[in-house]
Image (tube, rainbow, N blue to C red):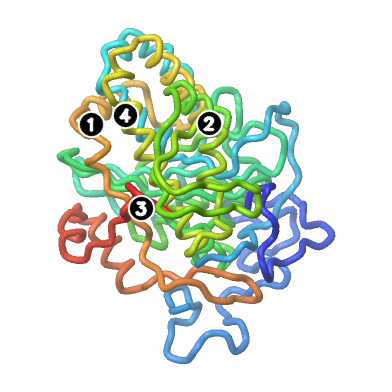
Amino acid sequence: MSPLDPPGPGAPVPGPGSGAGTAAAGQSPAGQIPVGQTPAGQIPVGQDPAGQIPAGQDPHGFFAPGGSGDDPGGPPGPGDDTPARKRRWPRVLAAVGVFLLLIVVGTAGLVWQRQSAYNGNIERVPSAMPTGKNRPGPNVAGTQNWLLVGSDSRAEVGTTGAGARVWKQGGQRSDTIMLLHLPADRSKAYVISFPRDSWVQIPGYGPQKINAAFSYGGPPLLIETVESLTGIRIDHFGAIDFNGFKSMTDALGGVEVNIEKSVYDPARKVHWPAGRQTLDGEKALLFVRQRYNLANGDFDRIKRQQAFLRALAKKASDGGTVSNPLKLNRFLSALTKSISVDDSVSGGDLRKLALSMRGVRPGDVEFMTAPHKGSAQRAKQSVVLLDKAKATALFEAVKTAEVAQYVEKYGGTNRVGTVS
């Protein structure tokens, strides 16, 4: 939840010590939660909330019938001694960092002239990838899967980008979680968003909201959680921060979105008229943050995030940007100063990937949401329950590099040209 978001109905009120730091993957936060147990008031591993899971459903209710609540998914915690910086945007769109880097880098000769400078701007996250023996096997040759996140910072510190740490114990939650799947032929790109309140099994902590994994154990535990849920091996990790997002938008002269009906955001007292809107960095921030007064709450906010991603990609790759060296340089400088990737990604890797994606255009990107059955209650928490059959089919399609066939058969892509 953004610091600006009022608490939703039924959201638990933090008690004393709720700001305590949380532990790395496989450990307990601040020595208070033994491995294999959950924080006080939540569901013990392997048990169901009394009277809440109907008979005939799977034991933990990860995939069951039931949009998304407002209560947070993981315990907040104190900051560390990282130098203070401006607050990062809680709803950052992590896919911009990697996705647009690859598209734009493949379209402009200027990038090659300044590739060393751009690569030097990108922060590498040490030990971001899990090292356990139970990870899924390799993906189909030539494909790649990136886990892309935006974090909800709980302190005035940098979380991504040059000179910052992408995660600190208990200090943030991954409110934006996206799986970027790149087919071997690079004819398409698929972005699958996971609702932040998805009720899943977090290794070592039992049933929890998916965004709690980032708070408990940072990138490795979040990746391990997604791999356990999907059976898909994650190749790389990426994240982006607020200041860079704002400067990227403004460097492009704003981006355009289309709103279906006039809507008021009571949380930020903003009225959005119906029709096409040109958003600068500040307005874009408000646009993708809103969930109150949207018909489907957090699910509509996911579509807003995806609509903005497409708009930013379109503007970044159009002729007015790539033919203007100064404008393109401002955009790429802001982008690369704001993103973090796992430390296995070299400059050469990014160049190769950019070249492989030089034919991909914004219209070639398909946006999806992990199949779900809406919301339900778990131990007084409003959570999102994934649809087991449909989600399993989608994840299997990613593993076997048959997402195009899945879409043709089942549909499931989000229409983001016009959003709520």
Q: Closer to us: mark 2 or mark 1?
A: 2
Compare marks 3 and 1 and give the one earlier in the sequence. Answer: 3
Q: Closer to us: mark 2 or mark 3?
A: 2
Distance CA(mark 3)–CA(mark 1) = 18 Å
Q: Closer to us: mark 2 or mark 4?
A: 2
Q: Is residue 131 visible?
A: no
x 74%, y 53%: residue = 30
Mark 3, secondary structure of its residue: strand
Question: At which x and y percent is residue 121?
Answer: 48, 19
x 52%, y 44%: residue = 287
Compare marks 2 and 4 and give the one earlier in the sequence. Answer: 4
x 28%, y 61%: residue = 412
Q: Residues within 10 Å of mark 4 (few under 14, many from 20)?
A: many
- Tell me the quarter of the picture where residue 83 sits: top right
- Which residue was labeled with disc 1? 357
Front one among 269 and 3: 269
Give the residue type at disc 2: Gly
Give the left or right position of residue 108, taking residue 46 as reference: left
Distance CA(mark 1)–CA(mark 4) = 7 Å
Give the left or right position of residue 196, taking residue 367 as reference: right
- Which residue was labeled with disc 4? 102
Compare marks 2 and 3 and give the one earlier in the sequence. Answer: 3
Q: Quadrant of the C terminus?
A: bottom left
Compare marks 1 and 4 and give the one earlier in the sequence. Answer: 4
- Which residue was labeled with disc 2? 281
Front one among 180 and 31: 180
- Which residue was labeled with disc 3? 192
Question: At which x and y percent is residue 252?
Answer: 42, 23
Give the left or right position of residue 398, taking residue 277 as reference: left
Question: At which x and y percent is residue 86?
Answer: 68, 29
Compare marks 2 and 1 and give the one earlier in the sequence. Answer: 2
